[in-house]
Image: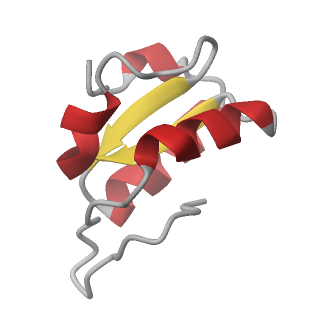
Amino acid sequence: MLQARGEISAEGNVGPIGGIAQKMVAAKNAGATIFLAPADNCNEVMGRVPEGLNVLKISTLSQARTALTKIADGESPANFATCE
């Protein structure tokens, strides 16, 4: 589930979000192990990922849904694109 103040276009393209470094920390502190980062935010993500948080690089809503479905079915988050 995308929990950010970015936007998703009618075509399903995911735009950047503000404060991503703080949002990753907050997600980790809330118990998250997976965080979906818009590809346009990768420059802000690199080197700032909290220990134990898997940050997946996404560009579209479809890509996000596919990744989460596969992870829910047992696939490792390490098999998906990241910003690093």
Q: Position of residue 81 (x, y in %)?
A: 29, 27
Residue 39 at x, y = what percent? 22, 46
Q: How many marks?
A: 0
48 and 61: which one is in front? 48
Q: Nearer the viewer, residue 39 or 65?
A: 39
Q: What colour scheme was applied to this rendering of the protein?
A: secondary structure
**As displayed, is residue 71 above or below residue 20?**
above
Classify residue 16 by image quadrant.
bottom left
Q: Is residue 68 left or right of residue 73?
A: left
Residue 57 shown left or right of residue 3 in the figure: left
Image location (x, y in percent) of residue 36: 46, 44
Q: Residue at x 31, y 38 (%)?
A: 57
* x 34%, y 16%: residue: 47
Which residue does the image show at 51% across and 64% down from the upper left?
4
Give the answer, above or below, for where 55 lies relative to 23.
above
Q: Nearer the viewer, residue 78 or 33?
A: 33
Residue 3, x across and y down, in percent: 59, 62
Q: Is residue 14 above or below residue 71?
A: below
Q: Quadrant of the C terminus?
A: top left
Against 8, residue 69 (above or below) is above
Q: Quadrant of the N terminus?
A: bottom right
For residue 26, side relative to residue 10 (left or right): right
